């Protein structure tokens, strides 16, 4: 598979997938994050990983197509999730997969600073609807992680992370 990991950050997910795929592009709108990933690519002499500065909310010029697009813990930072999901649909090969992992509704408690946080998690039914509207089929969702965090004045609180996946026709 040729994979796009969108909002890759420092490459935690991209580097886990790397041994299992033909190529993986780590895309992010932060040069700082991509710099860290580039250091890892060089350190481990990875030949099938590349980085790309990209913000698909404003940039529609990417010409490549992918068999799989992953996006982990990035959607809550994005202004308009539907724009991105549509963009992802266009960037997939026929039968390609989209996998988005993000927080269930968290009442704004997951992040101690709200700067850059556009959504306090997502209702799974709303995310599913966006997949449907964009044209995705075979949509499935599951809980993939529980993150325990210390929340001021509350103590340790558990935040669940869903994975929503869909397939292009
Ligand atoms: C919480 S980090 C998640 C990083 C990584 N996916 C992970 O799971 O470890 C969110 C990432 O999304 C990136 N990001 C935020 N808005 C973005 C956008 N509109 N386009 C691309 N990347 C974005 C940030 O720069 C950051 O690296």
Image (cartoon, rainbow, N blue to C red):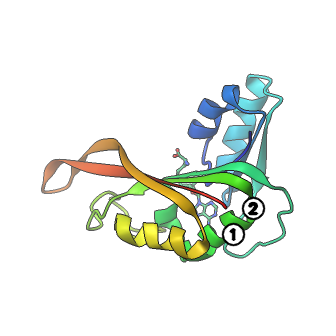
In the shown orientation, is residue 140 left or right of residue 98? left
Identify the element where label 1 is drawn: helix
Judging depth in this view, the residue of 14 and 136 nearest the camera is 136
> Residue at coordinates 53% horizontally, 68% vertically from top-left?
131
Which element carries disc 2, helix, strand or loop?
A: helix
Would you call the spot at circle 2 few (<14 residues within 10 Å), some (14-19), or many (20 or more)? Answer: many
Pointer 2 residue: 91
Q: Give the residue displayed 46% in from the left and 65% down from the top.
A: 76
Q: Can you tell which quarter of the image residue 13 is in?
A: top right
Instruction: Give the alpha-carbon distance from disc 2 to disc 1, as whole Å.
Output: 6 Å
Mark 1 Cβ inside 8 Å of ligand 1 = no
Q: Outermost residue toward the top? A: 44
Asked whether the residues under the numbered discs 2 and 1 touch, taking CB atoms below 8 Å apart as contact, a structural biologist would say yes
Question: For mark 1, does the 10 Å Cα neighbourhood hold few (<14), some (14 to 19), or many (20 or more) residues?
Answer: some
Q: Where is residue 103 in the image (x, y as percent from the top left)?
A: 37, 57
Residue 43 drawn at (x, y percent): 75, 24
Instruction: In the rendered structure, find residue 87 and report the number of the disc placed on it.
Output: 1
Q: Where is residue 118 in the image (x, y as percent from the top left)?
A: 45, 72
Q: Can residue 117 be seen in this view?
A: no
In the rendered image, residue 137, in percent from the top left (x then y), is placed at 56, 62
Which residue lies at the image location 59% right of the left edge and 31% below the top edge? 16
């Amino acid at each position: 598979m040729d994979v796009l990991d969108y909002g890759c950050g420092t490459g935690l997910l991209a580097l886990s997938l790397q041994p299992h795929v033909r190529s993986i592009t780590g895309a992010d709108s932060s040069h700082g994050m991509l710099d860290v990933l580039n250091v890892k690519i060089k350190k481990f002499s990875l030949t099938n990983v590349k980085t790309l500065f990209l913000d698909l909310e404003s940039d529609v010029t990417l010409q490549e197509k992918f068999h799989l697009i992953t996006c982990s813990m990035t959607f809550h930072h994005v202004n308009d999730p539907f724009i991105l999901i549509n963009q992802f649909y266009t960037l997939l090969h026929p039968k390609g997969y989209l996998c988005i992992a993000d927080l269930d509704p968290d009442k704004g408690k997951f992040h101690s600073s709200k700067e850059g946080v556009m959504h306090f998690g997502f209702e799974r039914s709303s995310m599913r609807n966006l997949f449907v509207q964009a044209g995705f089929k075979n949509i499935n969702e599951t809980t993939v992680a529980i993150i325990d965090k210390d929340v001021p004045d509350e103590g340790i609180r558990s935040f669940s992370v869903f994975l929503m996946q869909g397939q292009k026709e």
